[in-house]
Image (cartoon, rainbow, N blue to C red):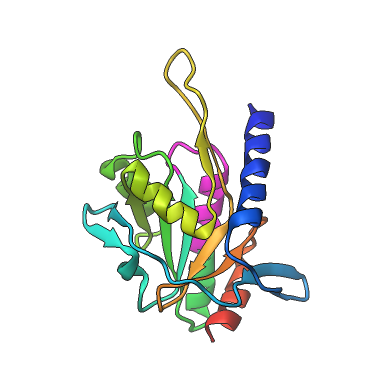
Amino acid sequence: MFVIVLVAFIAGLAVALLFGPKRHPAVGNADGLVATVLPDPPELVAFRMQDHQGRPFTQDDFKGHWSLVFFGFTSCPDICPMTLQVLANVRQLMQDSGLQPPTVTLVTVDPARDDLPALQQYVAHFDPEFIGLRGADDQLLAFAKQVGAYYQPDAPDENGNYNVAHSAALFLIDPQGRYHAVFSPPHYPDRIAETLARISG
């Protein structure tokens, strides 16, 4: 199973690199490069989803603040909980430094199982300010394609259980509602916080 997920992830990453928006040399610190900034950030085009409180959410809801977006799902065994904990730590580090932290948004790639109660409980476990998004398959795909996010459900087993291979990247949306940068794994809270301060400053 791990090999299948790994192969699917690598294939998705290759597609994103080939067909996603053109990217600019990375912004980083002495310990390594942690973000790739788009030289001409594209504005997000229309999509319509629902947040974990049941409210409509469109591309316009990203405007007015910096946002980090992660595509995952609540049944994810490892990558998702680890990444969301990193993002909670990023927000805390920035708050402790007197900086405005980004809004964090989890977009579920498993809307069939991730209903609103599941999303509510999941995102609140990491940070009560986190936002969970779910939507119909076409709207999820419309948003994911704009940033080059990849996801692919596995075939269900005999009990109906399945995993979903997905991108592990973090996508940065700027206050103008544009896809501004991408953070590739591995993710470290201090490096992300420092890079965000540089980008948003």
**Picture residue at 60% right of the left edge, 55% below the top:** 19
Any magenta on residue 82? Answer: yes
Q: Nearer the viewer, residue 136 or 40?
A: 40
Specify whether residue 136 is in view: yes
**Picture residue at 41% right of the left edge, 55% below the top:** 143
User: Residue 165 location, x and y as percent?
Assistant: 55, 38
User: Residue 108 location, x and y as percent?
Assistant: 41, 46
Q: Nearer the viewer, residue 171 or 97?
A: 171
Total marks drawn?
Answer: 0
- Residue 124 sits above or below residue 4 on the image: below
Residue segment shown in magenta: 73-88
Task: Residue lying at the far bottom in this picture: please name it.
Answer: 201
User: Residue 171 location, x and y as percent?
Assistant: 52, 62
Q: Nearer the viewer, residue 130 or 98?
A: 130
**Picture residue at 40% right of the left edge, 52% below the top:** 142
- Residue 141 sits above or below residue 75 on the image: below
Any magenta on residue 84? Answer: yes
